[in-house]
Image (spheres, helix red, strand yellow):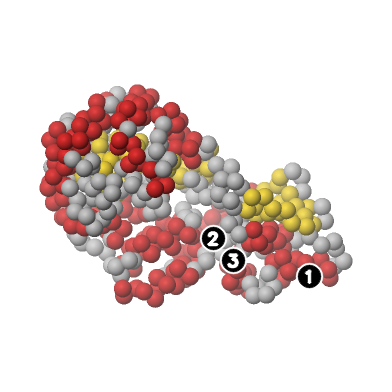
Amino acid sequence: MDEVCKNHLWSGAGKRILAPMVRISTLPFRLMCLDYGADLVFTEEIVDQKIIGCRRKINEHLGTIDFCSEGDNFPRFRTCSKETNKLVFQIGTSDGEKALAAARVVEQDVAGIDVNMGCPKPFSMLGGMGAALLEQREKVRSILTMLVENISKPVSCKIRVLPSVEDTVDLCRLIEECGVQAITIHGRTTSERAQHPNRDDFIAEVARAVRIPVICNGGSSEIRHYTDIEKFRLKCHATHAMIARAAIASPSIFQSDGFDDFKTVVSHYISYAVKYEECVQLVKYTIQRMSRERHDFVKIIQETAAAATMYEICQVWGMEKIYEDRVKSLQKSMECNRLRKTFEGETFSLKVNYVRKHFKLKTPKLLLHQWCRETNRRQPVYHTEQRSSDRKFNSYVTLDNKHFKSELWISNKRYSEHSAALVAIIYLGLTKLLPEKCLNEMSLDHNISAFL
């Protein structure tokens, strides 16, 4: 890609950009912000090693491109064509070669690559990533040069200011020399947090000192309305503006004709979360973050936090029909024989998760045990593997020389065994043994309903 094409992503002035936010800036939230008018969106920071080992997969049923590693319950990165030309992929790295390997995995599906050089969180800095790079200028040069010279998409980086304006300007000049197309500057030092004032004057000095686009960041405390984003940009003499906390508090801040009410915004987000099968824990976390200042929604937020499944979240917000319609749509596009996965002859698996509150004393393991006893079969035998990378468990149960397993890796060993027992119950046609609440929930899961 020539320099003209590379610079197109950051051309012009006044772009309003969604910041990279861990556990927030996933596909549903990014698409919602684009709908509201964001010009560009960043992914959450994804560490180089986590994406290097991923396999690119076109998910025909969801209309997405998924990047998955073996054994993952959910993709490490999911995107779709709607955001391709407006999406910047942010890498957490401390090594140029690893950064390049990670960038090449996703390069064809994003508009740009960004290097995180500003995250002050311990998990990032202890690995030599994020803000730890601010004091390692040769490593900064190595990483950025490696990317600029070897990938076709525009490269940028995101930093925090240093304690002195002179050092900040010097660092940004070095970054410019590496050939990056843009630089985002958060106006606080590594030790400062949201309660400290943003150093807008530092950003302005950098903007005057370099020739590449400068994106200002860190001004959410003074951004309350759409027009405030432009005021912040002008105050910093920046080319574009990026917002994080202001976008979480009200994603509709990106639209020029005023805010949508909170329930409308949450419903917008949930619709995308259902459509693209977002992880339930991430959905709950995002809604809770969006509602921090919404004291009039305390009860419904508490009910959201208590939900165990996506359908229960939809029930809380009165969106059951959206979920049910989506399931019907997916059922039409998926054949039963494609839902069933067979490994090593007589091993059967499904993506099934044990939800404790759906059962009382009669757990899946107990139900399967009782059925075997009543039918004079040998008792089931459970086998469990623990994954070293995150200490999660995956179990399978052996019964009549057949193996049944859940495709999910689960934090609790006992719950993992219950999930395996559930798979056996489903495949053996014993669902009449299950509690009504469990059956109702499974009937709304397109991965399972074909077997009920």
The first of marks 3 and 1 along the sequence is 3
Q: Which residue is mark 2?
A: 328
Amino acid type shown at disc 2: Lys
120 or 278: which is nearer to us? 120
User: Are the two marked residues, 3 and 1, in contact with CB atoms closer than 8 angstroms?
Assistant: no
User: Upstream in the sequence, badge 2 or badge 1?
Assistant: 2
Disc 3 element: loop
Which residue is under mark 3? Answer: 355
> Residue tagged by mark 1?
370
**Three-letter amino acid code at the position of disc 3:** Val
Q: Identify residue type, mark 1.
A: Gln
Q: Tell me: residue 174, above or below residue 257.
A: above
Indicate the position of residue 217 as horizontal and vertical percent values.
23, 47
Among the two numbered marks 2 and 3 on one chain, the one whose residue lies closer to the N terminus: 2
Label 2 and label 1: CA atoms lie apart by 34 Å
Local SS, label 1: helix
Mark 2 crowdedness (10 Å alpha carbons): few <14, some 14-19, many ≥20? some
Q: Nearer the viewer, residue 446 or 414?
A: 414
Q: Residue at x 25, y 46 (%)?
A: 189
Q: Between residues 215 and 251, which one lies in front from this camera angle? A: 215
Q: Is residue 342 left or right of residue 310?
A: right
- Residue 337 visible to the viewer: no
SS of the residue at dot 2? helix
**Tally of marks:** 3
